[in-house]
Image (cartoon, rainbow, N blue to C red):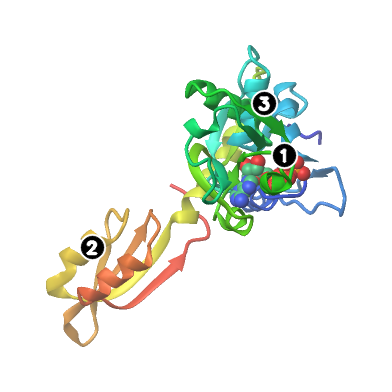
Amino acid sequence: MKPLLRIAVQKKGRLAEGSLDLLERAGLGITPAPGALTCRARGLPVELLFVRDDDIAALVMRGVCDLGIAGENTLREEALQAPGSTPLQTVRALGFSRCTLKFAAPANGSVCSVQDLQDKRIATSYPAITAAFLEENGVTAQCVTLQGAVEIAPALGIADAICDLVSSGATLAANGLEAFATVMQSQAVLVRSPKPWDEAKEALLARLLRRMDGVIASRATKYIMLNAPKDAIDEITALLPGADAPTLMPLAGRNDQMAVHAVCRETIFWDTLEALEARGAHAILVLPIEKMMG
Ligand code: ATP
Ligand code: ZN
């Protein structure tokens, strides 16, 4: 059967793994041959196109692909570089490939604020976003566009500062740089082409989205089980993040204790576990949830 939906995903890089993992968990059934540029899914009438992340916006915009998974940063850069074109519609924020576009400059140097960038040279892979931010802040500077290795530009003497993607900040520190301003936060998003679709295509997207929502919801969601003293149950259930109605069960041979089971729809941090323990909870188990629906 002819594929109904064609999706552009990154071939290799920081978006690729998360994109394939999400689609696979949504039941696509994808086993790309090494080096393949396309792959037909076994589970749904979908074809994947493996491309560079920078090409995804244009492929979806032109309708070559119906959907694409790209970073918000590249989508904004593309949109700013093609003013007047219909912006792509973001159908879902996907929660992976999170990063922040930041300004950074050599630590203890003369540039440590946005105002200090006046008349300086800024290395970046995102010249349009950088220029728009500088304009909003009334600063005039020169952008030096580099596709990669932006962090070494100051050491090479070709820039005074950089505007680059940061996740942990380790790469900045390794290059003697310090971030001083945030331009934008980014994550992977699913975008669709602005062209109108027929009913079958819309129905398949709705089905795919329902499954993706299940995968995304189950990522942060955990099943928590613990035993707790009866007199602390209210306090303990109030500590469970995003749990609406916990199940309370008696414990055999322990009249002063109860078992609490709950689906937590928000991340459970170590701090929460420590707080639970401090209120007498014990035998605390946090389990992943594989799929969720309804
Ligand atoms: P390509 O060969 O596809 O052009 P690339 O080198 O431009 O790849 P990657 O480094 O793989 O791109 O980054 C792809 C996207 O992943 C970025 O546009 C951004 O949205 C996201 N990303 C970049 N850096 C990080 C990071 N440190 N942590 C998480 N996500 C990131
Ligand atoms: Zn790229």
Q: Earlier in the sequence, mark 3 or mark 1?
A: 3
Q: Residues within 10 Å of mark 1 (few under 14, many from 20)?
A: few
- Does residue 227 appear in the picture of this structure? yes
> What residue is pinned by disc 2?
237
Q: Residue at x 36, y 58 (%)?
A: 264
Q: Is residue 209 left or right of residue 55?
A: left
Q: Could you tell me how many numbered marks the image carries?
A: 3
Q: Residue at x 54, y 26 (%)?
A: 134
> What residue is pinned by disc 3?
78
Question: Looking at the image, which is closer to me, 108 or 67?
Answer: 108
Indicate whether 212 appears above or below 132.
below
> What residue is pinned by disc 1?
158
Q: Earlier in the sequence, mark 1 or mark 2?
A: 1
- The kind of residue on which mark 3 rests is Glu
Question: Looking at the image, which is closer to me, 145 or 212?
Answer: 145
Mark 3 or 2: in front is: 3
Asked whether mark 3 and ligand 1 are closer than 8 Å, the reply comes as no
Q: Position of residue 146 (x, y in %)?
A: 74, 37
- The kind of residue on which mark 2 rests is Thr
Q: Is residue 51 left or right of residue 121?
A: right
- Dot 3 falls on a residue whose secondary structure is helix
Q: Residue at x 31, y 56 (%)?
A: 243
